[in-house]
Image: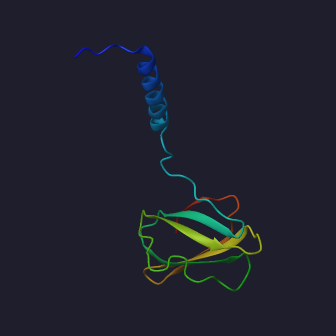
Amino acid sequence: MTTRFRPHVLAVALACCAGAHAAAAQPAPANPAPVASSDLHVLRLTNSGKMGITAIYAAPADSIDMSDDLLGRQTANAGRTVTLKIKDPKSVCAFDLQFLMNNGDTVTRKRVNLCQTVDYVFTP
């Protein structure tokens, strides 16, 4: 059986594969930024301390009512990064964050601007 060379078939196959190869060659972002809705702040928090964080609370700046524990069942161990979702029904940017350390100490950071901050490094 003799196979004839068909340049138009080869050209179509190459064009098809080249497009797929070009799409596959595009690197995906290594760590895409979290996406927030209009009533939710998403914050990637890295614990750069030596102690684990067992609970994190947030409230609009100068408010006395803190949120429920944002970590839930997880713990932000030293060197670990966690993603937090903070409800914001009033489009508030400045929040007070309170961290409960695994030794029982509490650390508070006042007026953290969550509208301009996606990645937050916690340093006790």
Instruction: Tell me: 52 left or right of 118.
Output: left
Residue drawn at x 65%, y 59% is 117
Q: Quadrant of residue 10?
A: top left
In this rendering, is residue 42 above or below 23? below
Lateral position of residue 18 relative to residue 87, left or right: left
Residue at 75% x, 70% y is 92
Instruction: Name the image colouring.
Output: rainbow
Q: Classify the position of the N terminus by image quarter.
A: top left
Give the percent coordinates (x, y) of residue 27.
48, 40
- Image position, residue 14 (x, y; %): 43, 24
Q: Nearer the viewer, residue 74 or 56?
A: 74
Q: Residue at x 76, y 69 (%)?
A: 91
Locate residue 121, reporting x and y percent.
54, 61
Please count the marks in the image. 0
Q: Residue at x 44, y 80 (%)?
A: 73
User: Between 39 and 72, which is closer to the camera in this rendering?
Assistant: 39
In percent of width and height, residue 59 lies at: 67, 78
Query: In the picture shown, does residue 115 fall above or below 24?
Result: below
Q: Spot the residue most to the front.
A: 1
Looking at the image, the residue that sits furthest to the left is: 1
